[in-house]
Amino acid sequence: MKKKSENNWLIILFFVVLSILFIYPMLYVISVSLSFDGDIAKFGYQLIPERITFVAYSYIFQTPKALLQSYMVTIFVTVVGTVLSLILTSSLAYIMTRKDYRYSKITGYFVFFTLLFNAGLVPSYIVMTSVLHLQDTIWALILPYGVSAWFTMLMKGFMDGLPFEIIESAKIDGSSELSTFVRIVLPLSKPALATVGLFYALAYWNDWWLAMLYIQNENLIPLQYYLQRIMSNIEFLTKNMQAGISIDMSAIPAESSRMGIAILAAGPMLFAFPFFQKYLIKGLTVGAVKG
């Protein structure tokens, strides 16, 4: 009993140390974002700033309306995109698990095929702009990530573990296919839905590539692309100053702004993650051990 207690303490200590190692870099990022660039150049990165300042955030928030607008766009894209992706992914995964569906195997083959091969950027750009005419619309930020083959296979792996007898019993009771899927399959798949949903949400939240390709309307700029443009402007000014062009960089907190941008970009998802953690662990490990 004593040995078991000692082992528990060792495991707890290991995870405490591991947690500190993960939190430590984040504290550095926050510290640097609250420092003067002069202090960073003189003393380097410090866990506790020499002098605390919010000049980096003031620089980022110079146009608060545009920043708020980009936040609203990103929140809308993340919420709508995640819900739509879960509907499409779970539906596709469900028909792949139905052994009484004639085309389940060939459907699975086509999904798996897209994991190995894809058309590339040029065909997808032509489809989005010339065929679907989605350029400069909010759907250009949502539809390209609508279905992921990898997440579909992950969802299928979970649904394969559901007893097929439940579906047969529902059919005997007169339940329609849609009713069986919505009322029985989806509630039983909550861990997988939460896991895949979190991955989709992260993909939508962190995306700036689609905005760079398809969006020119300033009102549809998402947060990540807005922050990336600020970062590009700072780098452009820094390079010009190094090339000998006279630019006053004293008013531009280059280094601290980089860290401030990281906080603004990652902060909301860091707060959202703990609410999904319970389902995330269960969704990733379910079916790993049987018997």
Image: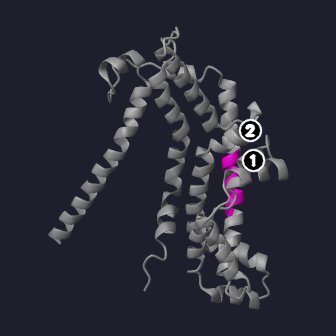
Q: Quadrant of the N terminus?
A: bottom left
Amino acid type indicated by mark 1? Ala
Count of labels shown?
2
- Give x and y (percent) for residue 183: 71, 74
Q: Quadrant of the C terminus?
A: bottom left
Rendered residue at 40%/38% (across/down): 26
Could you say which quadrant of the image residue 214 lies in? top right
Q: Earlier in the sequence, mark 1 or mark 2?
A: 1
Q: From the viewer's side, name the closer residue of 92 and 126.
A: 126
Give the residue at mark 1: 140
- Give x and y (percent) for residue 288: 45, 76
Tag 1 and tag 2, C-beta contact below 8 Å:
yes
- Give x and y (percent) for residue 125: 74, 49
Give the secondary structure at mark 2: loop
Q: Which mark is residue 203?
A: none
Q: Which residues are magenta?
A: 77-86
- The answer to whether residue 236 is visible is yes
Q: Which mark is residue 215?
A: 2
Q: From the viewer's side, name the closer residue of 256 and 112.
A: 112
Rendered residue at 61%/55% (across/down): 200
Would residue 20 appear left or right of 282 to someone viewing this image? Answer: left
Q: CA distance from mark 1 to mark 2?
A: 8 Å
Indicate whether 157 appears above or below 128: below
Badge 1, how many Cα within 10 Å: few under 14, some, many 20+? Answer: many
Rendered residue at 71%/46% (across/down): 141
- Give x and y (percent) for residue 248: 51, 9
